[in-house]
């Protein structure tokens, strides 16, 4: 009896200490490290945007301007319905008389007087002496306009297309709607149309509605004039109808003030950002890491409006209590962003998988770039298959698995493989692939005769062949999981099609024409803009490693691990072979260059981790730390390429933690050198997974030994289940590499 008492007391004491320490540790507010201006000036193409929103929610806003450098804002949108779009219902703020030129004028700001956080934006219009502030909710938001002139009339101008229609409502407030159109690609394009609805009120600082007698409603333009010095625009958005927008308003804003939304937004962001808590690291590493984590929550977005949602996939309103997610670019996000969500937010990822299946049921095709209006035909291959096998093997199965498999199979066997044409039926060119196992290039000098091929995007035969090899591998693996062994075996053979383009002398994937002849090209620079006649956005040196699903097969093609390691060394050292000014004419998508390696484009993300498979894990540790230090800084230039709404940021999050999913579909993560001394992931199942790397620093980065829950491990890999059940991965670091650790026999 005394033994049981003391043992129970001891266990309770330990539990109390753990809870107390966790509570104390969680008091630190890691949202302080988020800076949405990081990367707001691009290295070459598209910058990041300082987006204000709640995590994975449909109401988003960022000021409409060229990039951070510009000191003029074109407008403040009320809603950004799709990533990178400049937004809808564009607001300008003016005092005095409004003239025709007022509608096209810009608003000057002072960058140093901006306040930019995920839950709050505020800026001072320096020429107009007006302060504009914004804070979001899920389907709604509030703008605050503060004027300093007592005598002048205050004006809010809202512009849209000629489709913008507005109404003043008898029961208070006003509403308007805007038509959003999208025309599909191909020889027989279809224009999709949907409406975005707004219900809004102007109120004073006591939340009393302001007299709208000066309201002027003209199609395409709305003018609101006031005498009040402080005005709040409270509004809610709907994709269903005006009544639903009003309902969203009641649910989210009826009892909430501007300050309430700020408090709610800050707390909501704390919950997701503080899910990963770190110790150590420099100020730059902390700011880069937590800003990257914030960006992974920009997409996808839940457009379910409290029990129903409008789907652009069948143009109908559906009743559902389950979240419905849209706005994804799967070519960019399947590699790291979706796998990250399987760890941090498995329920959301499960709902995302379910949303994809529902889109398939509604439209007949499993989307690849699902937007609010429907599938956006973009890039190449059908990588939506990847997120299903990856999620399935991590236990995410709360959706119609049968239909998911059906949709993947239809995409790969019945859909065209022509880039930027996903969701159209296959044509003769696709039949060639299914018969011969590779996608053919035009012969040099041959004129394109397939009308469905895009005049700019071209055929992209190498990435199509490699991408479809991976996709058929995912289908094969999914079939095996579902007990469809014959189908699995057949698709596995198709997944080896990448080998047909391997040139044994050049040690690269080189395009072949329909006669089976190699094309005599320069794999560094041939193919026109973006190398699209043969590759896509990256040259042949990048695509030489695009075989995530069969790394052992790639090793064999390269002549064994030692030769593979040497060839990978060469990738990072091989010169451009031309001036940068010439290189960027065609290679503008290939940014963040290290030799022939492009840190600024998604097909490169897994490449530095291949050393783990080639027998030199210490080189993975060296390269990943180097790439983070060189290309991901905490300033306006801090992103090496198109960030793509979380796709690139997820690479930063994973790599900073010392982990990376090289092959989505195999539930195993590569291990590399983490930048923090301690990183704790608070899992949704109540457990914690922690990576400990005492003394981690710029010089002290090489793994000497590794322990998982106190037991020494000898390979640079960790299974997903080891993370999800919680535990401690301890890495012993030193300044010089242990070249024997982690080598796979």
Image: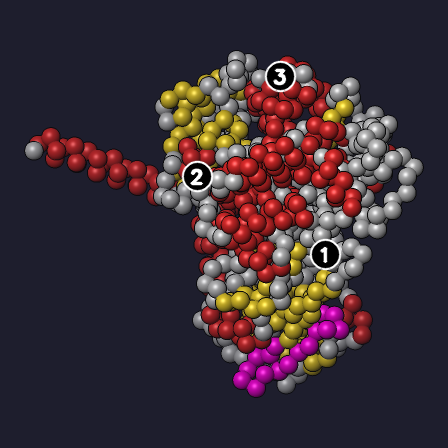
Q: CA distance from mark 2 to mark 3?
A: 34 Å
Q: Is residue 619 left or right of residue 657?
A: right
Quadrant in the rendering for residue 472:
top right
Using the image, determine if residue 266 lies above or below residue 202: above
Q: Is residue 588 left or right of residue 388?
A: right
Give me the disc on residue 561: 3
Of circles 3 and 1, which is in front? 3
Question: Does the segment drawn in magenta span residue 171?
Answer: yes
Residue annotated with mark 1: 65
Q: Secondary structure at mark 3?
A: helix
Mark nearer the N terminus (3 vs 1): 1
Magenta residues (range):
160-175
Q: CA distance from mark 2 to mark 1?
A: 36 Å
Residue annotated with mark 2: 681
Q: Residues within 10 Å of mark 2 (few under 14, many from 20)?
A: many
Main secondary structure of the magenta stretch: loop
Mark nearer the N terminus (2 vs 3): 3
Residue shown at the point (47%, 60%) measured from the top left: 322
Picture coordinates of residue 201, whole percent (x, y):
57, 76
Residue shown at the point (54%, 49%) measured from the top left: 404
Query: Which quarter shows the N terminus?
Result: top left
Picture coordinates of residue 97, whole percent (x, y):
75, 77
Q: Is residue 745 left or right of residue 635?
A: left
Q: Nearer the viewer, residue 365 or 69?
A: 365
């Amino acid at each position: 009896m005394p033994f049981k008492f003391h043992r129970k007391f001891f266990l309770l004491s330990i539990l109390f200490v753990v809870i107390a320490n966790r509570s104390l540790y969680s008091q630190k507010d890691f949202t302080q490290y988020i800076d949405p201006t990081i990367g707001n000036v691009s290295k070459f193409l598209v910058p990041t945007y300082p987006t204000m929103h709640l995590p994975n929610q449909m109401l988003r806003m960022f000021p409409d301007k060229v990039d951070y450098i510009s000191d003029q804002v074109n407008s403040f949108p009320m809603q950004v319905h799709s990533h990178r779009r400049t937004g809808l219902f564009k607001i300008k703020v003016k005092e005095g008389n409004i003239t025709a030129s007022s509608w096209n004028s810009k608003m000057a700001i002072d960058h140093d007087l901006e306040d930019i956080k995920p839950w709050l934006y505020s800026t001072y219009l320096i020429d107009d002496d007006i302060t504009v502030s914004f804070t979001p909710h899920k389907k709604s938001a509030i703008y605050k306009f503060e004027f300093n002139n007592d005598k002048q009339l205050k004006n809010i101008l809202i512009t849209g297309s000629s489709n913008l229609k507005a109404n003043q409502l008898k029961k208070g407030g006003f509403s308007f709607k805007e038509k959003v159109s999208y025309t599909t690609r191909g020889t027989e394009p279809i224009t999709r149309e949907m409406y975005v609805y707004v219900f809004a009120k102007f109120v004073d600082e006591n939340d009393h509605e302001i007299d709208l007698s000066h309201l002027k409603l003209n199609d395409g333009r709305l003018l609101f004039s006031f005498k009040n010095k402080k005005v709040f625009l409270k509004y809610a958005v709907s994709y269903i109808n005006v009544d639903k927008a009003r309902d969203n308003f009641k649910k989210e804003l009826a009892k909430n003030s501007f300050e309430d939304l700020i408090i709610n937004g800050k707390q909501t962001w704390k919950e997701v950002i503080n899910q990963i808590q770190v110790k150590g690291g420099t100020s730059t590493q902390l700011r880069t890491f937590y800003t990257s984590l914030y960006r992974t929550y920009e997409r996808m977005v839940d457009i379910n409006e409290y029990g129903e949602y409008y789907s652009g996939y069948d143009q109908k309103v559906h009743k559902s209590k389950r979240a419905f997610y849209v706005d994804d670019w799967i070519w960019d996000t399947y590699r790291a962003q979706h796998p990250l969500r399987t760890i941090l937010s498995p329920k959301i990822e499960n709902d995302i998988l379910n949303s994809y299946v529902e889109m398939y049921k509604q439209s007949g095709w499993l989307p690849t770039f699902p937007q609010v209006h429907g599938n956006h035909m973009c890039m190449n291959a059908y990588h939506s298959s990847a997120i299903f096998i990856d999620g399935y093997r991590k236990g995410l199965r709360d959706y119609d698995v049968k239909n998911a498999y059906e949709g993947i199979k239809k995409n790969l066997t019945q859909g065209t493989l022509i880039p930027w044409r996903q969701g159209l039926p296959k044509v003769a060119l696709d039949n060639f692939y299914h018969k011969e196992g590779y996608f053919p290039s035009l012969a040099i000098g041959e004129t394109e005769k397939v009308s469905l091929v895009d005049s700019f995007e071209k055929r992209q035969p190498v990435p199509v062949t490699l991408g479809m090899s991976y996709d058929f591998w995912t289908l094969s693996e999914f079939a095996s999981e579902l007990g469809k062994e014959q189908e699995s075996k057949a698709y596995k053979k198709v997944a080896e099609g990448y080998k047909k383009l391997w040139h044994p002398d050049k040690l690269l994937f080189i395009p072949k024409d329909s006669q089976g002849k190699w094309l005599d090209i320069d794999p560094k620079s041939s193919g026109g803009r973006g190398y699209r006649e043969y590759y896509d956005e990256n040259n042949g040196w990048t695509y030489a490693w695009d075989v995530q699903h069969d790394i052992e097969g790639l090793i064999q093609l390269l002549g064994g691990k030692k030769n593979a390691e040497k060839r990978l060394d060469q990738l990072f050292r091989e010169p451009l072979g031309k001036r940068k000014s010439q290189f960027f004419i065609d290679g503008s998508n290939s940014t963040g260059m290290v030799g022939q390696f492009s840190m600024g484009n998604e097909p490169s993300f897994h490449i530095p981790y291949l050393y783990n498979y080639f027998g030199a894990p210490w080189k993975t540790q060296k390269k990943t730390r180097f790439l983070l230090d060189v290309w991901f800084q905490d300033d306006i230039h801090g992103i090496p390429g198109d960030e793509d709404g979380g796709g690139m940021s997820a690479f930063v999050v994973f790599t900073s933690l010392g982990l990376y999913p090289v092959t989505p579909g195999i539930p195993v993560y590569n291990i590399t050198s983490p930048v923090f001394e301690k990183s704790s992931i608070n899992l949704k199942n109540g457990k914690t997974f922690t990576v400990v790397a005492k003394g981690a620093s710029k010089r002290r980065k090489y793994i000497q030994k590794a322990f998982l829950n106190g037991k020494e491990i000898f390979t640079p890999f960790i299974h997903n289940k080891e993370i999800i059940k919680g535990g401690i991965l301890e890495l012993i670091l030193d300044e010089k590499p242990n070249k024997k650790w982690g080598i796979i026999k």
